[in-house]
Image: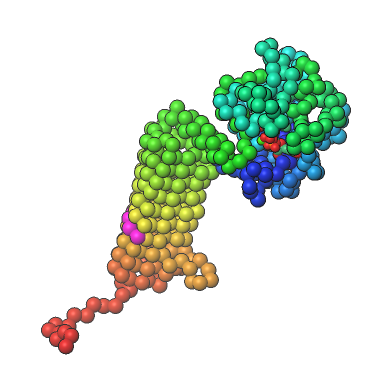
Amino acid sequence: MLAVAVLAAGKGTRMKSDLPKVLQPLAGATLVERVLASCEQLQPQRRLLIVGHQAERVEQSLAHHPGLEFVLQQPQNGTGHAVQQLLEPLNGFHGDLLVLNGDVPLLRPDTLARLLSQHRSSGAAVTLLTARLADPTGYGRVFASDDGRVSAIVEHRDCSAEQRRNTLINAGIYCFNWEGLAEVLPRLSSDNDQGELYLTDTVAMLSPAMHLEVAVADEINGINDRLQLAQCEAVLQQRLREHWMREGVTFVDPASCTLSEGSRFGRDVVIEPQCHFRGTSTIGSGSRIGPGCLIEDSSVGERCQVVHAVLRQATVAADCSVGPFSQLRPGAKVAAGCHVGNFVEVKNSTLAEGVKVNHLSYIGDADLGAAVNVGAGTITANYDGVRKHRTVIGAGSKTGANSVLVAPITLGNNVTVGAGSTLTRDVPSGALALGRARQLVKENWPGPV
Ligand code: UD1
Ligand code: CA
């Protein structure tokens, strides 16, 4: 039997934030979501989350997460005190307890699987993850013999100058035999610099205590302040970009781009500098994105070009060009072969195949038929001050420059709208519509006197 406990009750004083530390986001997911995800592969029978500081907020943020047991730690008197709160809910439990610090978000599931299997095959009372860090400042130091047995963990602030030279650190990830741990937990004392109960002190009371050293130290990075948050973000971003490069994506300037885990890219996608992908976004094969794009919860089809554009909850089919300087807002649905050009905003509208909106337009709450050509500066006036109304433009129609279509309005197929028109009434198919003052020319005008 396996139970997992995540320590998430601390305030995170060093973050200097109103948000509890474990709710800080990293590449679109909170620290605690990442920690929980890292142990899913082990299929634990129980998942316990120790909450305390802003407990309700932490619980709410995980409401969608099935099978979690929340355990309240009040007040928060250290990591040992946190695990003492499990004595009641885990009363009668037989098996192993995996303890994860809620602020160690980059762990690889495979590493946890190795920890568990080493722990089980060695018969140790506790096995903990360690790493050798060039700069171990702030971490607890692990004192171990060559055969992997651990004698003690001493917190950085409690170390002597000599002990601080030890570069083997405690990652804050432990696998305990629960019955053994339950016996020693009540004996913890707060005789240390912080006056707290340290979980790390149980290690000297358990025998044998073993450790598993990980080679890539990145994955055990703990987050105590914003500097470490930024470092972890950089590690995650690097992992994501490397993954997609291996899948056939070209990044012209990788370090200038950020990705979310929910983003997907086809082969031969080229990503120019300064592009950012958020939420669940998909880019089809052969498309070229950037420079300078923000794409969130949107999909772009194959062989598209998107330059200096912002897309949010928008879909763009194959062979389209978008930008430079276009904004596709929620509900923009662009069919294949369309052109959306500079200073064009599209919202809650459908553009059928081959539509061109090349310059300076607002298309909101509109349905444009196939091959419609929207002239420069055309605006759909969709808002009467109270409600939004739709504009429909039939296939093959053309609007002249600087047209205003006051919705609700329907233009039939193959309509031509004269430049500078303001239209307030429907236009049948095949018609020319003009809605502007007729030009007057007076010859031999004397001019200003
Ligand atoms: C802890 C370890 C240290 C290790 C480091 C790894 C102890 C005493 N020290 O130090 O050896 O090198 O992690 O990152 O365990 N928490 C609670 N309740 C509390 C206090 C903390 O739930 O009363 C939670 C925090 O929310 C956090 C985790 O425990 O998720 C670790 O606490 P933190 O204060 O960050 O410990 P460190 O000083 O980093
Ligand atoms: Ca920490």
Predominant secondary structure, magenta span: strand
Q: Quadrant of the N terminus?
A: top right
Is 441 positioned to the left or the right of 84 in the image?
left
Q: Is residue 359 magenta?
A: yes
Question: Who's the residue at 49% across and 66% down the image?
Answer: 389
Q: Give the vertical position of 120 relative to 169 (above or below).
A: above
Q: Is residue 178 left or right of residue 16?
A: right
* Residue most extreme to the top: 147
State which quadrant residue 301 falls in. top left
Residue 112 appears in which quarter of the rendering?
top right
Residue 79: percent from the left, percent from the top? 75, 34
Residue at the far bottom: name it: 449
**Horizontally, is 395 left or right of 96 in the view?**
left
Q: Is residue 342 left or right of residue 177?
A: left
Q: Is residue 350 visible?
A: no
Residue occupying image coordinates x 40% and y 61% = 362
Compare residues 4 and 433 and report the one nearer the observer.
Answer: 4
Please, which residue is most extreme toward the left here? 444
Residue drawn at x 72%, y 41% as measured from the top left: 10
x then y, percent, for residue 300: 43, 43
Along the viewing direction, whichever of 396 and 316 lies nearer the viewer = 316
Residue 199 appears in view: yes
Query: Looking at the picture, does residue 435 appear above or below residue 148?
Result: below
The answer to which image quadrant residue 427 occupies is bottom left
Q: Quadrant of the C terminus?
A: bottom left
Give the magenta-colored segment's residue range: 356-360
Q: Position of residue 54 (x, y in %)?
A: 73, 48
